[in-house]
Amino acid sequence: MILKNYYYYFTSAIPAKICDRIISEATQQKPERGLVDNKEFKSVKPSNKEISKVKKVRESHVVWLNKPWIYKLIQPFVHEANEKAGWNFQWSWTETTQFTIYKKNQHYNWHADQYDYLDKNNRIRKISMTINLSDPKDYEGGVLEFDFRNQNNRSDCIVPCTQIAPKGSIAVFPSFVFHRVTPVTKGTRYSLVAWNCGDPYK
C-alpha cells in the first residue's frame, strides 16, 4: 500500500495534568515485562533463553489500562488523523491501552503492530497511536522513529517523529508501518499506546 502520510501528529494535544493523571493511575499498578507479539512467552515462568530472545527486540515494562475516560479522550484523535491523513480505514474498536515504561537502556526495536492473526471477533489492528506522557527534560533518547519504506535496512528512510517530543503529543499511524523506540539513555520515558481494530482489508 502506497501512503501519502506515514503518520499524523498532534503536538501538545493532551494537557499536562491529564498526562500526569494517566501516569499516576498506571504507576499504582505492578508493571509486567513487555512482550513481543504478546506470544513469545509460552510458559508461566519464562526461561532465561525466552527472556533474552525478547530483550533483543524489546526491553520495557507495561501496565494495561482499561479506562472508559481514556478511550473517550483518545478516540477523537484517531478519527481525525484517519480522515486528514487520507487513510480512511474502517475501524470499530480499541484494544486495552498499554502504558509503557522505558528506563535507561530500554528500547523497542523495529516492528509493526499489525499481527498476522485475527482477534476473536475477526478484527485486525489498523491504526496505532502513541502519546508521549513525559516532559522531554525528564529523559534522553527514547525517540519514536518510522521507516518510511516500511522496511528496516536503509538508514535514509528512517525518520524520527520529533513532533511528539513535547509532553501530551500524539502520533497516529497505520499499524503495518514499521517503527521503533530508540534506547533511553537517561531518565524515564512514559507513553500510552492504543491499537484500533476493524474488519480485514478487502
Image (spheres, grey):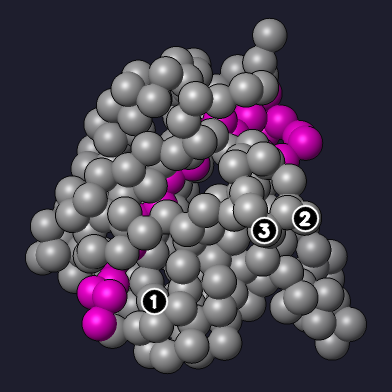
Q: Can residue 91 be spotted in the picture?
A: yes
Reading the image, the residue beneath label 2 is 153
Evaluate if marks 2 and 1 touch, with contact meaning CB atoms under 8 Å apart: no
Q: CA distance from mark 3 to mark 2?
A: 7 Å
Badge 1: how crowded within 10 Å, few (<14), some, or many (20+)? Answer: many
Query: Could you tell whether 7 is left or right of 117 in the image?
Result: left
Identify the residue at image location x=63%, y=77%: 59
Q: Can residue 71 be spotted in the picture?
A: no
Give the image location of residue 88, x and y in percent.
Answer: 44, 16
Mark whose residue sits in front, 1 or 3 = 3
Identify the residue at image location x=42%, y=55%: 161
Identify the residue at image location x=42%, y=18%: 86
The residue stretch that appears in magenta: 113-137
Reading the image, the residue beneath label 3 is 155
Helix, strand or loop at label 2? It is: loop
Badge 3: how crowded within 10 Å, few (<14), some, or many (20+)? Answer: few
59 or 73, which is in the foreground? Answer: 59
Residue 11, labelled with which disc? none
Give the image location of residue 82, x and y in percent.
Answer: 39, 25
Identify the residue at image location x=60%, y=42%: 148
Please state which amino acid type lies under the numbered disc 3.
Answer: Ser
Reading the image, the residue beneath label 1 is 189
Q: Is residue 165 magenta?
A: no
Depicted 132 relative to depicted 27: above or below? above
Q: CA distance from mark 1 to mark 3?
A: 24 Å
